[in-house]
């Protein structure tokens, strides 16, 4: 008797750069009885991530996805659509696709016509990702919501606020799965155990994520404050910042290693420029990870998530561009680390309620079991 193969879930993304939220969904799907297969094009320098996918099947598309200009980006989306259509149109096991955001969903457009099920993970609202005029934002949002209505069998949001941000369109099936990651490895917060204050920026290290503020923060903060940058992003800017003796830059590391770093710094920074609409609705992994290990947080006030965190005593807050307010708080903490210890204790009870991975994992597995049930009987 031949063994029944697990239904495959093809995960369509424009990049192989590791994303722990997407890996989390792959594991939920696997636990629900599906076999995740990652599908992505080439990007310059991304072959260094190949070993990270050793536990998964992968399909590397034979073209390079480029974003160097608006035209190159649109052309790359068109190539993604053509390659995905060509490869999967006649594959009998290609029934379910997890499309990452709008671009992944567009790539599945022609496959939808032959009856595949497209499950869109709205990890980022495309229409709110850029600093554009209100009119252009509404145009992009209308296009984005129309694509999801026509193509997506299922839409998965990290929070209801992201669905509302999209305009609450009428979609076929909507699920909410927060970006809380596994707690199997969770070192306890220790702090830096030194007279200096060690401040961490991690994840996507780009201008809009607070890196643009760092040059000024270095001018207005004590020599006893050091900055640890862990992740990837604007390499030219990061290399320049690392030239300062108070800044250390470490390229992308595993989540486990990132948590180890986070446990041994004094405070973790989660800054998101309010000039970009989606940043005000940010639901970052770095905040959930800080809650997981009780590492004190500094979140800019414009982020919606900052208000409940601040009320619970789980973060410090200041407006994004208020360099002096941010610097003054950091300078204060150099001489009063007791505040950090008190915050760490307050974070324990808050995280137990709002960052419960086991509860979220069960919801994620149940969702993918629902998706498996959509498969016609063999």
Image: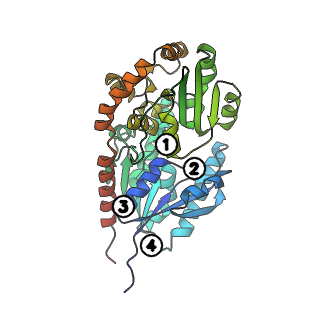
Q: Earlier in the sequence, mark 4 or mark 3?
A: 3
Is label 4 or label 3 in front?
3
| Residues at marks 4 and 2, CA–CA distance in whole angstroms | 26 Å
Label 3 vs 1, first from the N-terminus: 3
The residue wearing badge 4 is 93
Q: Point out the tag, 4 or 2, that comes first from the N-terminus.
A: 2
Q: Return the disc, 1 or 4, that comes first in the chain's sequence.
A: 4
Residue that carries the numbered disc 2 in the rendered image = 17
Q: Nearer the viewer, mark 1 or mark 4?
A: 4
Earlier sequence position, callout 3 versus callout 2: 2
Label 1: state its secondary structure: helix
**Disc 3 element:** helix
Residue under numbered circle 3: 31
* Mark closer to the observer (4, 2): 2
The local crowd at label 2, few if under 14, some if 14 to 19, many if 20 or more residues have their Cα within 10 Å, is some
- Residue at the spot of label 1: 126
Q: At 67% across and 37% down in the image, what residue appears?
A: 235
Disc 1 versus disc 2: nearer the observer: 2
Where is the C terminus found, in terms of image quarters? bottom left
Q: Residues within 10 Å of mark 3 (few under 14, many from 20)?
A: some
Q: Residues within 10 Å of mark 1 (few under 14, many from 20)?
A: some
Q: In the drawing, does residue 242 fall left or right of residue 4?
A: right
- Asked if the residue at tag 1 contacts the one at tag 3, i.e. Cβ–Cβ closer than 8 Å, the answer is no
* Point 47% across, 19% down: residue: 319
Location of residue 49 in the rendering, given as x and y in whole percent from the top left corner: 60, 53
């Amino acid at each position: 008797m031949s063994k029944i193969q697990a239904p495959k879930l093809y995960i369509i993304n424009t990049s192989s750069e590791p994303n722990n939220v997407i890996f989390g969904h792959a594991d939920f799907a696997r636990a629900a009885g599906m076999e995740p297969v990652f599908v992505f094009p080439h990007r310059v320098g991304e072959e260094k991530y190949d070993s990270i996918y050793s536990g998964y099947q992968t399909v590397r598309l034979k073209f390079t996805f480029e974003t160097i200009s608006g035209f190159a980006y649109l052309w790359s989306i068109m190539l993604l659509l053509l390659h995905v259509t060509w490869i999967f149109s006649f594959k009998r096991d290609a029934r379910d696709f997890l499309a990452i955001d709008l671009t992944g969903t567009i790539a599945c457009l022609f496959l939808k016509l032959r009856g595949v099920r497209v499950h869109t993970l709205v990890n980022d609202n495309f229409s709110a990702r850029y600093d554009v005029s209100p009119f252009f934002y509404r145009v992009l949002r209308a296009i984005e919501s129309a694509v999801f209505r026509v193509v997506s069998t299922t839409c998965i949001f990290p929070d209801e606020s992201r669905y509302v941000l999209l305009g609450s369109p009428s979609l076929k099936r909507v699920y909410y799965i927060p970006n809380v990651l596994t707690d199997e490895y969770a070192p306890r917060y220790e702090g830096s155990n030194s007279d200096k204050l060690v401040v961490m920026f991690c994840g996507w290290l780009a201008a809009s994520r607070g890196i643009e503020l760092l040059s000024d923060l270095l001018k207005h903060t004590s020599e006893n404050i050091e900055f640890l940058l862990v992740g990837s992003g604007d390499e030219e800017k990061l290399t320049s910042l690392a030239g300062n003796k108070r800044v250390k830059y470490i390229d992308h590391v595993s989540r486990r290693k990132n948590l180890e770093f986070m446990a041994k710094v004094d405070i973790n920074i989660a800054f998101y420029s309010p000039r970009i609409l989606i940043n005000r609705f940010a639901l970052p992994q770095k905040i959930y990870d800080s809650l997981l290990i009780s590492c004190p947080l500094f979140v800019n006030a414009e982020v919606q998530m900052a208000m409940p965190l601040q009320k619970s005593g789980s973060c410090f807050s200041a407006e994004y561009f208020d360099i002096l307010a941010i610097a003054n708080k950091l300078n204060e903490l150099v001489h009063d680390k007791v505040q950090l210890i008190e915050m760490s204790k307050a974070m324990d009870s808050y995280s137990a309620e709002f960052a419960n991975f086991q509860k979220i994992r069960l919801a994620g597995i149940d969702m993918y079991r629902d998706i498996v049930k959509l498969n016609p009987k063999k």
